[in-house]
Image (cartoon, rainbow, N blue to C red):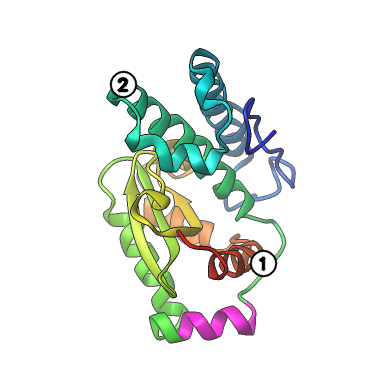
Amino acid sequence: MYDFYPFSVVPLQYPYNALEPYIDEKTMFYHHNKHYQAYVDKLNKILEDNPVLQRYDLESLVVKANSLPQSLATEIRNNAGGVYNHKLYFSTMTPNKTQPSDFLLKKINSDFGSFENLKNKLKDNALAQFGSGYAWLVYTNGCLRIIRTANQDVPLLTLNYPLLPVDIWEHAYYLKYQNRRNEYFENWFKIINWDEVEERYILAMNKRC
Ligand SMILES: [Fe+2]
């Protein structure tokens, strides 16, 4: 349903206004109900026209994209990527106050020096991304790292397992923040679902990219 054709949007686990004042209701509604939905609809249409691809799950489609014929590769990369990235973005935000557990914090301190360093590095990448894309906390070869990707590219394409994305497409923040990506980042950072990030970290430790 969410990971297999026909794909559907994962319902938000909280109301559209639950992240106020950090992310406004209107942005959340259009982002989740229109933009994310559009990627799902486009991906379903592509697979409807290419039934041989219907047996692959979402993660496999994302990873397979580059080995497909060029015209299809771009379509799958953009739209399966859009579905994958948005599913992850919305699930790693919460109106409930969470923080990294001691277990995760120990790893963060080991790989970044401090929690503050992680935040600063993630922010630097979010602000440095030219145009649309994402900045990410990922897990690679036993280490936590920060990377950024353009458009709807997914870290799995470069053998990085994604734990936490910040969406820096303008549709994620422009209605409230206009050009103030820095302010959007600071407020987004307050609503991260660290419980979900830790679940993904544990999953990543037991998985090969
Ligand atoms: Fe988005």
The residue that appears at 40% across and 32% down in the rendered structure is 78
**Residue 124 x/y as whole percent:** 31, 63
The disc at residue 25 is none
The residue that appears at 57% across and 26% down in the rendered structure is 54
**Residue 39 x/y as whole percent:** 51, 28
> Which SS class for mark 1?
helix
The residue that appears at 42% across and 29% down in the rendered structure is 76
Q: Nearer the viewer, residue 70 or 110?
A: 70
192 to 155, vertically: above or below: below
Report the amino acid beneath label 2.
Ser
Instruction: Give the quarter of the figure containing the C terminus.
Output: bottom left
Q: Is residue 11 visible?
A: yes
Instruction: Give the quarter of the figure containing the N terminus.
Output: top right
Residue bearing mark 2: 71
Q: Of the residues tagged 1 and 2, which is closer to the observer?
A: 2
* Secondary structure that dominates the magenta span: helix
The stretch of residues the image draws in magenta is 101-109
Report the amino acid beneath label 1.
Asp
**Farthest top residue?**
49
Q: Say if disc 1 is inside 8 Å of ligand 1.
A: no
**Residue 140 x/y as whole percent:** 41, 67
- For label 1, count other residues whose C-alpha is less than 10 Å away and answer few (under 14), some (14-19) or many (20+): some
Residue bearing mark 1: 195
Distance, label 1 to label 2, CA atoms, is 39 Å
To which quarter of the image does residue 71 belong? top left
Q: Nearer the viewer, residue 49 or 88?
A: 49
- For label 2, count other residues whose C-alpha is less than 10 Å away and answer few (under 14), some (14-19) or many (20+): few
154 to 123, vertically: above or below: above
- 165 with respect to 145 (left or right): right
The residue that appears at 74% across and 47% down in the rendered structure is 13
